[in-house]
Image (cartoon, rainbow, N blue to C red):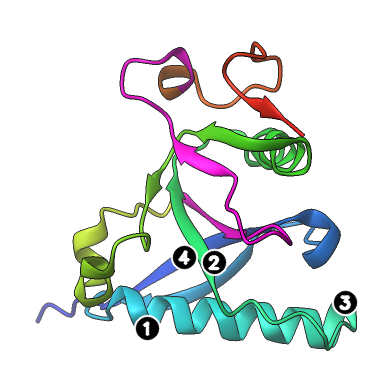
Amino acid sequence: MVVELYLKQVSFYALPFSTFKLTTPLHFFVSRVDTLELLERKIRRSLMAHLYNVVKDKSTNPSKFHLWNCECTDVEKMVKDLNYKYKNYTHASIKGTPLNINQRYNTTKFEDLNICEENLLIVELAKPNGEYVFRPAPAGSEESKTGSDDEGSDDEFTQV
């Protein structure tokens, strides 16, 4: 008898650090047949519980966010670099795939998103002006091959 589990572990990290104060990624399990819309709801619930119970912040509501699927080997370094870019740049490249930017992804099944257990989902809240910082790295760029580094040239990013 063969039993296949339909649950898959998902790890995610939320930016900016100043709001969520996450020291490690949050984890939960998702059914492989869930849609991206349900994944967003579960992430929103997890973030609200973290904000309410750990940070003691009842005023922040992460209702809209961008979700990025990032491959990473060194989570700590990647998150530090992304948080630095989030704070100091108006636009920055990220080595990752945007998951929920287009409406067509809301009906996509989780198993069709190609998210491995080694991948980290990055939750990006909009800045106070309503703008999002991260853009997908161009396919041929050095950053898309090596990941993010905070020593990029000024013409790659627009500083605040």
**Visible residue check, residue 58:** yes
Q: CA distance from mark 1 to mark 4?
A: 13 Å
What residue is disc 3 on? 55
Of labels 1 and 2, the one closer to you: 2
What residue is disc 4 on? 10
Q: Secondary structure at mark 2?
A: strand
Residue that sits furthest to the left in the current view: 1
Amino acid carrying label 2: it is Phe
Residue range (magenta): 119-143
**Mark nearer the N terminus (1 vs 2):** 1
Assign the C terminus to one quadrant of the image.
top right
What residue is disc 1 on? 38
Q: Residue at x 58, y 33 (%)?
A: 92
Q: Secondary structure at mark 1?
A: helix
**Mark nearer the N terminus (2 vs 4):** 4
Please say if 142 is above or below 69.
above
Q: Secondary structure at mark 3?
A: helix
118 relative to 150 in the view: left or right: left
What residue is disc 2 on? 65
Amino acid carrying label 4: it is Val
Q: CA distance from mark 2 to mark 3?
A: 19 Å
